Image (tube, rainbow, N blue to C red):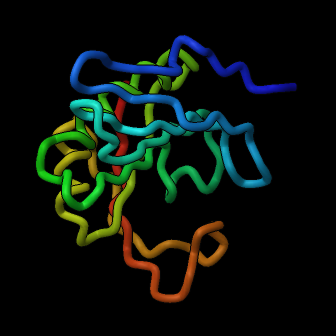
Amino acid sequence: MAFPFNSRFDQLGGGAFTLRIREKAEAGRVQLPYYYYDIVAEGVPVGKISVRIGDNYHTYYNGHIGYEVDEGARGHGYARRACELVLDVARFHGMERLYVTCAEDNAPSYRTIEKLGGRLLEICELPRDYFAWYEGIPRHRIYQLDL
C-alpha cells in the first residue's frame, strides 16, 4: 500500500521563507517514507530538510529530521525555522515524538535542536548494524522532541 503523502505539505511557510517539496519517497528496506524540501529564503535556495515518518531501529540514530544549510547561508536560524515548519507534517501523520540527532561536536546543530526543545537522551557510539555506519563515524547526540 502506498504511503498517504499529503499534497497540502508541498510548500510550507510563506513570504520570504518557504520550504518547497523536492521529493516524496516511499519506505525502503531500512528507510522510512519522507518528505524532502528545499529551504528557500528571499527566493534563494539555502539548504535542504527532510522529515521521516514512522519509526524503526535506524530512526533512533538517524533521526526523523535531517537538515543541511549551505555554508554561505549559515548563522541566520534557517535550520531552526525549517524544523519548526516540518513539525506540522509529523503531527499530521500522527507522530507524537521525534528523534533528532547530530554528530557530538556539531555545536550549531545541537544548539538548533536544543532551541527547538529537544531533550538530550544520550551521546553514543553508533552500532555497526546501523545502516549508515562507517569506520570512524563520530559519536552522536540523540535528542527527543515531544510534539
Towards the viewer: 139 or 28: 28
Residue 25 lies in quadrant? top right
Towards the viewer: 94 or 6: 6
The residue that appears at 34% across and 67% down in the rendered structure is 103
Position of the C terminus, as image quadrant, is top left
The residue that appears at 24% across and 38% down in the rendered structure is 80
Count of labels in the image: 0
Towards the viewer: 48 or 117: 48
Report the residue that reaches farthest toward the front.
43
Report the residue that reaches farthest toward the right.
1
| Side of 28 where 8 appears, left or right | left
The residue that appears at 20% across and 51% down in the rendered structure is 73
Towards the viewer: 138 or 18: 18
Residue 117 lies in quadrant? top left
Residue 86, compared with residue 99, is above or below; it is above
Task: Tell me residue 110's x, y (percent).
Answer: 23, 55
Task: Tell me residue 54's x, y (percent).
Answer: 62, 35
The residue that appears at 46% across and 87% down in the rendered structure is 136
Task: Tell me residue 5's x, y (percent).
Answer: 66, 21
